[in-house]
Image (cartoon, rainbow, N blue to C red):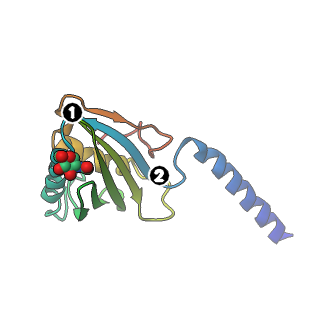
Amino acid sequence: MLHLLFAVTLLFVETSGLFLTNDRPHHASCKVEWDFGIQCDEVRARLRSQIMQWSTQHSCHDDRCKYELLLEDVDTLRAKHTATSFHYVNDIEFIFINGTNDCKVHGFSRAEDPLAYFDGSTNYCGMHMLITGSSLDKDTGYNEVSSDKICTQYSEATC
Ligand SMILES: *[C@@H]1O[C@H](CO)[C@@H](O)[C@H](O)[C@H]1NC(C)=O
């Protein structure tokens, strides 16, 4: 009887969990699409140098540190970011797609912890801070698209 009760409770929790997650990613993560009015080579170089600049300090108060560059390719940048505020370790990937005079970037960040559901917007901010840190958001043609459906706690973010 207890077993059955436990199973039913579990089923209920699972089902309501699924229902709740329809409006947000099932796992703490964030997808963003950016447009920049400059060539991908420059966008990549600026993101890379921002990652390097923020990879030397071991602590900071605003999460603008503890980045680690993992891979650089013509069309890819991968990095790891440890958010001091929530101790989440997030894996970031930027994919670059050349346009004629512009660059499209697909950003994806996910928490390494398989059980992470909320992330305090750290997946979004971990990417967004690199964009603002390197002033890429000041360029003409800059545009960012995401939503709470594909980016955990996107609208609550104060990076
Ligand atoms: C974009 O074009 C530039 C200039 O032709 C080239 O050097 C670079 O490798 C291209 N990048 C990608 C991501 O295709």
Q: Is residue 100 visible?
A: yes
The reply to whether the residue tagged 2 has its Cβ within 8 angstroms of ligand 1 is no
| Residue at the disc numbered 2 | 118
The front one of 41 and 78 is 41
Label 2: how many Cα within 10 Å (few below 14, some 14–19, many 20+): some
Horizontal side of residue 153 vs 83, given as left or right: right
Disc 2, SS: loop
- Residue 67, relative to residue 23: is it above or below? below
Nearest to the observer: residue 135 or residue 157 = 135
Above or below, 153 against 4 in this view is: above
In the image: residue 58, left or right of residue 108: left
Res 84 → quadrant: bottom left
Screen quadrant of the N terminus = bottom right
In the picture, measured across the screen, residue 35 lies left or right of residue 135, that is: right
Query: Where does label 1 land, which residue?
Result: 37
Q: Is residue 121 above or below residue 138?
A: below
Q: Position of residue 104 (x, y in %)?
A: 30, 40
The disc placed on residue 106 is none
Residue 47 visible from this viewpoint: no
Q: Residue at x 18, y 65 (%)?
A: 58
Image quadrant in which you'd find residue 39: top left
x then y, percent, for residue 122: 35, 51
Residue under the image location 70 percent in, 52 percent down: 15
Q: Position of residue 106 (x, y in %)?
A: 35, 46
Q: Are the residues tagged 2 and 1 within 8 Å (C-beta)?
A: no
Q: Disc 2 or 1, which lies upstream in sequence?
A: 1
Q: Hey, what amino acid is under mark 1?
A: Gly
Q: Residue at the right extreme? A: 1
